[in-house]
Structure formats: C-alpha cells, structure tokens
Amino acid sequence: MDYFGKADPDSAYELLKKEKSRIEEFRLKLETIIDIHSLHIDDKTISEISEICLDIRSFELRFKYNDGVDDLIESEKIERQGVFGIPELAELYGKFLILLKNLLSEKNFEIEKE
C-alpha cells in the first residue's frame, strides 16, 4: 500500500489506527448480518464472510504489536521504525472486493444505482 509507505512511521501508524477502527466496525456489522440473516444466506457466502471476519480479527491482533512499543516511544527511548499490519490491510481490502463481487454476481440482492 503505497499510501502508507510514503508516510513517516508515526503518520502511517495514525492512518492505520483509523483504518483499524473502521474495519473493526465493518467486522461487527458482518457478524451481525450472519447472526440475523444466516437462514437466508447460502453456506458458501456465510463461509466467505466468516473467513473475512477471522482475517479482520487476525489483523486486529497483529496491529496490537504496534502498541507494544508505545511506552518506549513516549519515554523517548526509541522512535517508531515501522508499522505492523499494512500488508494485512491490503489483503483484507482485496478480500472485501472479491466478496462484494461474488455477492453482486449471485443476484441475491436488489441493486439500485444512483
């Protein structure tokens, strides 16, 4: 993700932190969809959504490695050298697009273009 690569480590961390928050909210919404609509969604789609939810949780855990050095950074003993989770974020977005494409191609949803 060139967007994060061009930023300094502290800026990249802040950007990734915002994305983590958005993705975490997205995961909660996906889990709610599975809970409420599981009887109306085919097993393949439920499996794909569940896999993405697990990948998001994995990303959330990987992101926590960034917090492990915060005490040292605050005490000015070290500077942030990099950010954990950027490659995982790119992979997640790829999976989101594939899932969306699959959902739209199955014609199970009404689509309205604006």
Image: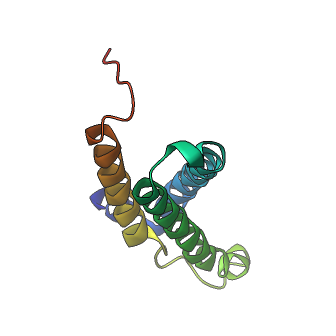
In the image, residue 114 lies at what x, y percent? 32, 14
Image height of 94 relative to 70, above or below: above
Q: Residue at 31% of width from left, 38% of height from top?
A: 104
Q: Which colour scheme is used?
A: rainbow
In the image, residue 76 lies at what x, y percent? 67, 78
| Total numbered labels placed on residues in the image | 0
Closer to us: 101 or 91: 101
Q: Residue at 31% of width from left, 58% of height from top?
A: 94
Q: Residue at 69% of width from left, 82% of height from top?
A: 72
Closer to us: 55 or 68: 55
Closer to us: 96 or 104: 104
In the picture, residue 91 is in which quadrant? Answer: bottom left
The outermost residue toward the front is: 39
| Horizontal side, residue 86 vs residue 17: left or right | left
Image height of 18 relative to 65, above or below: above
In the image, residue 57 lies at what x, y percent? 58, 68
Image height of 31 relative to 10, above or below: above
| Horizontal side, residue 112 vs residue 78: left or right | left
Q: Residue at 30% of width from left, 41% of height from top?
A: 106
Image height of 106 relative to 99, above or below: above
**Residue 10, visible in the rendered structure:** no
**Residue 46, visible in the rendered structure:** yes
The outermost residue toward the top is: 114
Q: Quadrant of the N terminus?
A: bottom left
